[in-house]
């Protein structure tokens, strides 16, 4: 994959830089960009706009260690999908009741975000779709693993990853589970995703909603790049 030696300006610029790696996907039938909120939505919107494809979201929540929440011991996704990294839980000696407490807390937050982000919009049907799965970076790959599992369970036809910055560890964990991995930089040693962006400010829920509203408005006026739930081969279920 193409490497970069300079910082990425922001998430939108990252998406625009990744889009050429998917030029063959432009207006490709049965294809969709699926982004992980929050930061992945800005990257995903740029890719979707560049390729004239619909955009949807898959809400995934990292299960952070009780005393070090930035470090993942697993993740959960819409539809009840979950993965736990048992070696991390064992190494950090996290009691089962603490693991369950984190799962419950993040499950409630996942439901809240799913309802707020969509605010009445129906999820796209993903069965038999070709999916470009997007985030703004991958450190451990735990969050992406549960997202991939959720999409496979939903019956997608293929999964390509678009992630601007990732670690070697994350790449090794996901590459055999997907059909393509596109990235801009895989630094060694890897310290943090944000160090490769000039602007890596935290996005709010309102920012995500605004980005998704742009995608929804474009789908309503673009002459058919999007599909409503139930239109795809009679399937009445999204993810």
Image (cartoon, grey):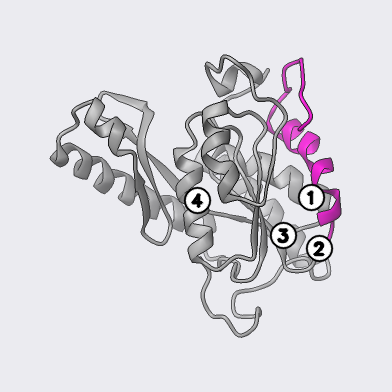
The boundaries of the magenta stretch are 1-27
120 sits to left or right of 160:
left
Outermost residue to the bottom: 234
Q: Nearer the viewer, mark 3 or mark 4?
A: 4
For label 2, the residue is 28
For label 3, the residue is 54
Confirm or deny contact between disc 1 and disc 4 (CB under 8 A).
no
The image quadrant of residue 166 is top right
Marks 2 and 4 sit apart, C-alpha to C-alpha, by 22 Å
Q: Secondary structure beneath disc 1?
A: helix
Q: Nearer the viewer, mark 2 or mark 3?
A: 2
Nearer the N terminus, badge 1 or badge 3?
1
Nearer the N terminus, badge 2 or badge 4?
2
Q: Is residue 10 magenta?
A: yes
Marks 1 and 3 sit apart, C-alpha to C-alpha, by 8 Å
Residue 63: image x %, image y %?
34, 39
Q: Is residue 1 above or below residue 192?
A: below
Nearer the N terminus, badge 3 or badge 4?
3
For label 4, the residue is 147
**Label drawn at residue 145:** none
Residue 160: image x %, image y %?
67, 50
For label 1, the residue is 49
188 sits to left or right of 68:
right
Marks 3 and 4 sit apart, C-alpha to C-alpha, by 18 Å
User: Number of numbered discs present?
Assistant: 4
Q: Residue at x 33, y 33 (%)?
A: 64
Q: Is residue 221 above or below residue 230?
A: above
Q: Is residue 158 magenta?
A: no
Q: Residue at x 36, y 51 (%)?
A: 82
Frontmost residue, 211 versus 198: 198
């Amino acid at each position: 994959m193409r490497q970069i030696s300079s910082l990425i300006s922001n998430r939108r610029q990252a998406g625009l830089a990744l889009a050429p790696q998917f030029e063959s996907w432009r207006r490709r039938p049965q294809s969709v960009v699926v982004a992980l909120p929050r930061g992945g939505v800005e990257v995903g919107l740029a890719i979707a706009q560049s390729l004239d494809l619909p955009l949807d979201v898959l809400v995934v929540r990292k299960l952070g260690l009780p005393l070090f929440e930035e470090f993942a011991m697993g993740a959960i996704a819409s539809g009840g999908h979950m993965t736990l990294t048992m070696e991390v839980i064992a190494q950090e000696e996290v009691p089962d009741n603490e693991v369950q407490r984190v799962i419950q807390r993040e499950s409630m937050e996942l439901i809240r975000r799913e309802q707020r982000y969509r605010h009445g919009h129906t999820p796209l049907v993903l069965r038999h779709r070709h999916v470009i799965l997007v985030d703004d970076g991958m450190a451990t790959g735990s969050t992406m693993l549960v997202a991939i599992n959720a999409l496979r369970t939903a019956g997608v036809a293929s999964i390509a990853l678009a992630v601007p910055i990732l670690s070697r560890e994350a790449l090794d964990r996901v590459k055999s589970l997907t059909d393509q991995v596109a990235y801009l930089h895989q630094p060694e040693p890897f310290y943090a995703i944000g160090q490769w962006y000039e602007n890596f400010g935290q996005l709010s829920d309102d920012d995500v909603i605004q980005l998704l509203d742009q995608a929804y408005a474009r789908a309503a006026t673009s002459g058919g790049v999007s599909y409503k739930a139930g239109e795809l081969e009679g399937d009445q279920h999204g993810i």
